[in-house]
Amino acid sequence: MGFIDTHCHLNDESYEDVASIVEECRNQNIEKMICIGFDLPSSIRAVELANTYDIVYAAVGVHPDDADSYNDEVEKQLEALALNNKKVVAIGEIGLDYYWDKASHDTQKSVFAKQIELARRLNLPIIIHNRDAFMDTYEVLNEYAPLRGVMHCYSGSLEMAYNYMKQGLHISFAGPVTFKNAKTPKEVAKEIPLDRILVETDCPYLAPHPHRGKVNYPYFVNLVGKEVASLKGISEEELMEAESRNVRELFGI
């Protein structure tokens, strides 16, 4: 058994040799990974990779930065990808991003809601991106609670984490939880119940310590898992078992 990277972007154009990355994941005992779409082309690519490598699964969706690209035709294609490929295990990443503000807030909220409804029709969980939009994200989600899904790369407060968990969501930790000055993520990881925890890399972004500022890879999830286990005062094996159980229950893997 190993850790599962529940959020990676093997479909990112910066990765030229995916086969060698997957092989290194096997060497480092990474059990599985979920490759996340952020627009239609990257969702198609995520499915291609999932169908190529047995330890890779896929999520399809449109990121809030690309909300202006979302329309009925895109939605139909995302739905077809999910219906026709058993290795599509979620709709994501979807949500709100008020930091980059590449689409209007109203457009982002509308596209977010439409993809939540798509996930409901498909009986799939959602993978939620949230940056500088904690209350609006909560309010959109509350229209559909209870939900199945995960707050990916969580960076908010413990209080807000409990609000999301009450909606039915899991909380996922990425590289920032390993940063020495990351007081809030460390506090949240320490307190979150084991049955709601996931770990991820969000690679190629947010490489964990001691690789901070460099290209990130799925096998660096071992560093994230090690840190979360340490914060919780449990063994890495105990966290692996809990995460594997959570992934199985949430994503059906």
Image (tube, grey):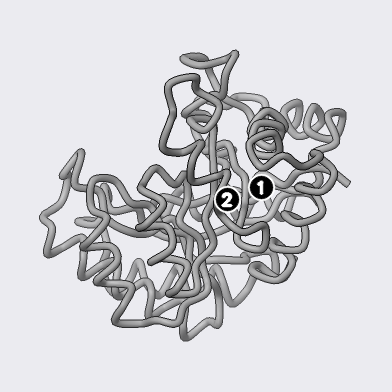
The kind of secondary structure element at disc 2 is helix
The residue indicated by pointer 1 is 49
SS for tag 1? helix
Q: Residues within 10 Å of mark 2 (few under 14, many from 20)?
A: many
Measuring 52% from the left and 55% from the top, which residue is drawn there? 171
| Above or below for 103 versus 148 | above
| Image height of 198 relative to 70, above or below | above
Which residue occupies 15% across, 51% down? 103
- Name the spot of residue 7 as percent of width and height, x first: 57, 46
Decide if residue 180 is in sight here: yes
Cβ atoms at labels 2 and 1 below 8 Å apart: yes
User: Mark 1 Cα within 10 Å, few/some/many (few <14, many 20+)?
Assistant: many
**Foreground of the two, 140 or 10:** 140
Answer whether residue 45 is visible to the viewer in this image: no
Q: CA distance from mark 2 to mark 1?
A: 5 Å
Reading the image, the residue beneath label 2 is: 46
Residue 136 x/y as whole percent: 21, 63
- Label drawn at residue 89: none
Q: How many marks?
A: 2
Residue 226 placement (x, y as % from top left):
71, 32
Q: Residue furthest bottom?
A: 121
Q: Amino acid at mark 2?
A: Ala
Disc 1 marks which amino acid? Answer: Leu
